[in-house]
Structures are given as structure tokens and as C-alpha cells.
Amino acid sequence: MLGKKLRQRSCIACRKLATREDLIRTVLIGNEVKVDLNHRMSGRGAWLHPNCFLVVTERKSFNHAFKYEGEIKFEEVADYLKGLSN
Ligand SMILES: [Zn+2]
């Protein structure tokens, strides 16, 4: 088992530090952003507050976070967050 290390991550939108519990981890696969619920997917992760998603889409923060130029699809994240608020 892993120890209880509270490693903090910064949100790609507001840049505030938060624990993993307060953020969702996303990874870029191809040009699609996937929600990494178990924090197990390999690759560069981008962390964000659920409430910051709108800012992320407006500022194209995914492009910056993943250093990806071009269109990024994030429907899966949008759907996931919709599910959270229900
Ligand atoms: Zn944030």
C-alpha cells in the first residue's frame, strides 16, 4: 500500500495547488482527452478542478498542458463532469 502522502498538484486552469482528491486527472490519448479516474493511465497527466473546466476550454489549457498544437477533443471530460453534477 502507498503511504498517505499528500502530494499536491496544480490545476491547469487556475494554477492553485490541490490534493488529488480535489482534482480530476486527465491524459491525452491521440487527440482526445480522457478522464483518468484511477490515476493509472500512463502519459502526461493534466489536473483540473471540476469547476475550472470551463476556463480550461476557454483558454485552451489542454493544449498548453499537453504541449499539443491542433484540435483537442474533450467531450469525454465534459460528459464526465455532467455526470458529476447530476
Ligand atoms: Zn482550478
Image (cartoon, grey):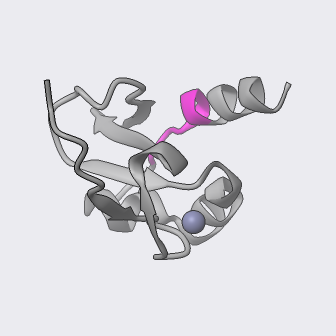
Q: Residue at x 34, y 62 (%)?
A: 9
Residue 3 colored in magenta in the image:
no
Is residue 1 visible in the rendered image? The answer is yes
Farthest right residue in view? 86
Q: Residue at x 20, y 48 (%)?
A: 44
Examine the rendered structure and indicate whether residue 10 appears above or below residue 26. below
Quadrant location of the C terminus? top right
Viewer-nearest residue: 4 or 36:
4
Q: Position of residue 83 (x, y in %)?
A: 74, 23
Q: Is residue 25 above or below residue 57?
A: above
Q: Is residue 30 left or right of residue 18?
A: left
Quadrant of res 40: top left
- Work out whether 43 lies above or below 8: above
Towards the viewer: 75 or 7: 7
Left or right: 43, with 30 as reference point: left
Ligand 1's quadrant is bottom right
Q: Is residue 74 magenta?
A: yes
- Residue 65 location in percent, x, y? 33, 63
Q: Quadrant of residue 49?
A: bottom right
The residue closer to the viewer here, 6 or 70, is 6
Residue 28: quarter of image: top left
For image coordinates 45% across by 30% down, the residue present is 35
What is the total number of numbered labels drawn onto the structure image?
0
Q: Residue at x 50, y 38 (%)?
A: 73
Using the image, determine if residue 12 lies above or below residue 83: below
Q: Is residue 68 at all visible to an observer of this figure?
A: no
The magenta segment is 72-77
x and y percentages locating residue 53 in the rendered image: 64, 54
Q: Quadrant of the N terminus?
A: top left
| Direction from residue 27 to residue 2 in the image, left or right | left
Residue 16 spot, x, y in % from top left: 49, 75
